[in-house]
Amino acid sequence: MLNVDLHSHSNISDGVLSPSVVAARAKANGVDVWALTDHDEVSGVADARAAAKELNLFYVPGVEISITWAAHTIHIVGLRIDETNPTLVQGLAATRGGREQRAREMAAQLAKIGIPDAFEGALLHVGNPDLISRTHFARYLVEIGRCADTHEVFSNYLTEGKPGYVPHRWATLEQAVSWIHGAGGIAVVAHPGRYNLNAVAFNAFFDEFKQYGGDAIEVTTGSHSPDQYAQFAKIANDFGFMASRGSDFHSPSESRIDLGALPPLPKGVVPVWHDWDFSSR
């Protein structure tokens, strides 16, 4: 059985390791098929592909696109994309736009509760205002001792209703699916169990994703509990989606699940890789 991990991040977005080091970790952990899916950015794809080739690791070029749907931020993973596709590249650039202003507003909120210089502190963890995210603020809050780890940060800060939360208007669901398909890719809903949607909203979202030609949802992921593996396997089958598997790895010290450490997909689903040709790497 192939060990497939189709969701991970490097320091190109909000991971801590370079694309080549993430590739090496995937290989060392027994991963056979690996995708780097940085947030709204594909500049790490070439390095990841080169590293995977050296390691004889089957590589899947990917991206994770932030969207706004019904006032919720949701992520759509694109797999097997052509990272040079002009429409995709332009769309991602537009999606990244506004991150710096949002980050400055987040820092202003944190300053009001006695956490000064959070913008500058977060920048030390990213280096590029175009890619600054809540994760970089979370690492700064851990660094200064405000919280023990990033999980505690997101329990107390930076999420809706908590200090430091500033919403951002991302791409639409239709745009994300269109960009991915236009680049020859497969559109996958990332970690659906993470979103605060009730059953009615979930059904509406999956219906809309289906209407736009959405292909798959993540079933086995580092963000899901074992009960949710079964829950989203059923949803995948009910809507006719394929099932994907990915750790959502960001860091050896922060991630709930390491690269390649997830259990297999539940029986009865159609893996997103069911018709891929693995004969060449």
Image (tube, helix red, strand yellow):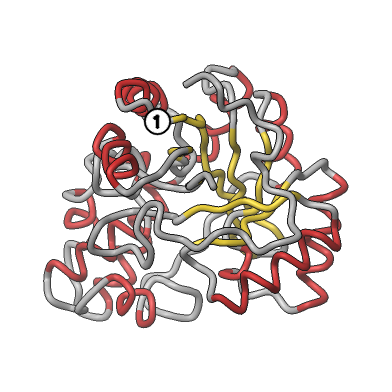
Q: Position of residue 107 (x, y in %)?
A: 29, 63
Task: Name which residue lies at 59% across and 18% down.
Answer: 85
Q: Position of residue 40 (x, y in %)?
A: 49, 39
Residue, disc 1: 57
Dot 1: within a 10 Å radius of its alpha carbon, few (fewer than 14), some, or many (20 or more) residues? Answer: many
Residue 34 drawn above or below residue 99: above
Q: Is residue 204 left or right of residue 112?
A: right
Residue 231 drawn above or below residue 265: below
Q: Quadrant of residue 264?
A: bottom right
Q: Which residue is farthest front?
A: 1
Q: Quadrant of residue 28?
A: top left
Label 1 element class: loop
Residue 251 drawn above or below residue 8: below
Q: Position of residue 258 (x, y in %)?
A: 34, 58
Task: Name which residue lies at 27% across and 32% down.
Answer: 20
Q: Nearer the viewer, residue 60 or 267?
A: 267
Q: Is residue 127 left or right of residue 200?
A: left
Q: How many labels sit on residues?
A: 1
Q: Nearer the viewer, residue 45 or 259?
A: 259
Task: Name which residue lies at 63% across and 64% down.
Answer: 192
Q: Is residue 136 left or right of residue 186?
A: left
Q: Name which residue type carries label 1.
A: Leu
Q: Nearer the viewer, residue 58 or 96?
A: 58
Task: Name which residue lies at 62% across and 69% down.
Answer: 229
Residue 131 drawn above or below residue 203: above
Q: Nearer the viewer, residue 140 or 17?
A: 17
Q: Position of residue 93 (x, y in %)?
A: 50, 31
